[in-house]
Amino acid sequence: MFGQNHGGNGNVNLKEDSRISELMELKAELTRKNKMGGRYKIQLGSFSSIESAERTIKKFEKEYEEYPAQLEYESPNYKVWVGDFTSRLSAERAFIKLKKEFKSAFVFKPNS
């Protein structure tokens, strides 16, 4: 943004670079699609069957609405990932709540 004061009347005219709006739209889209890098997640478990993974997601979603859950397939296992934390600290705080019920849970940072 560029500011310019005209004539000392206290008014400032702002001219925003059009690329700022484009970048903000791109960031919002990436956030919606969960493609923002540098985020932390919690893996609740790794399962050989999709049914077991889906049961875990349902159990999780019944108790914890505040964190998004997703099912990931990494051959040969189905993994249940939750959260989209911007810092390791916020992920660890959520992990403290979850580890009592999900014994194999751990915090990690996805490669992609």
Image (cartoon, rainbow, N blue to C red):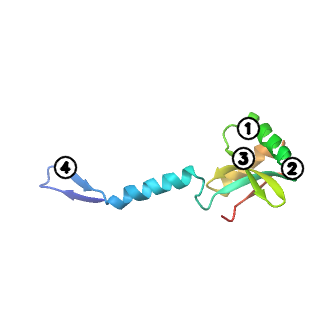
| Residue found at the far top of this picture | 62
Label 2 or label 3, whichever comes before in sequence order: 2
Kindly identify which numbered label has been placed on residue 49.
Answer: 2
The residue beneath circle 4 is 11
Confirm or deny contact between disc 2 and disc 4 (CB under 8 A): no
Q: Amino acid at mark 3?
A: Ala
Of tags 1 and 3, which is closer to the observer? 1
Q: Who is closer to the viewer here, 15 or 92?
A: 15
Find the distance from the CA under tag 3 to the CA under tag 4. 47 Å
Query: Could you tell me how far apart the alpha carbons at marks 2 and 4 are, in whole angstroms?
Result: 65 Å
Category of crowding for the residue at label 1, using alpha-carbon neighbours closer than 10 angstroms: few (below 14), some (14–19), many (at least 20) = some
Of the numbered discs 3 and 4, the one sitting upstream in the chain is 4
> x and y percent of residue 68 in the render?
67, 44
Q: Which image quarter holds the C terminus? A: bottom right
Residue picked out by circle 1: 61
Q: Nearer the viewer, mark 2 or mark 1?
A: 2
Q: Is residue 82 left or right of residue 25?
A: right
Which mark sits nearer the N-terminus, 2 or 1?
A: 2
Circle 2 SS class: loop
Disc 2 to disc 3, C-alpha distance: 26 Å
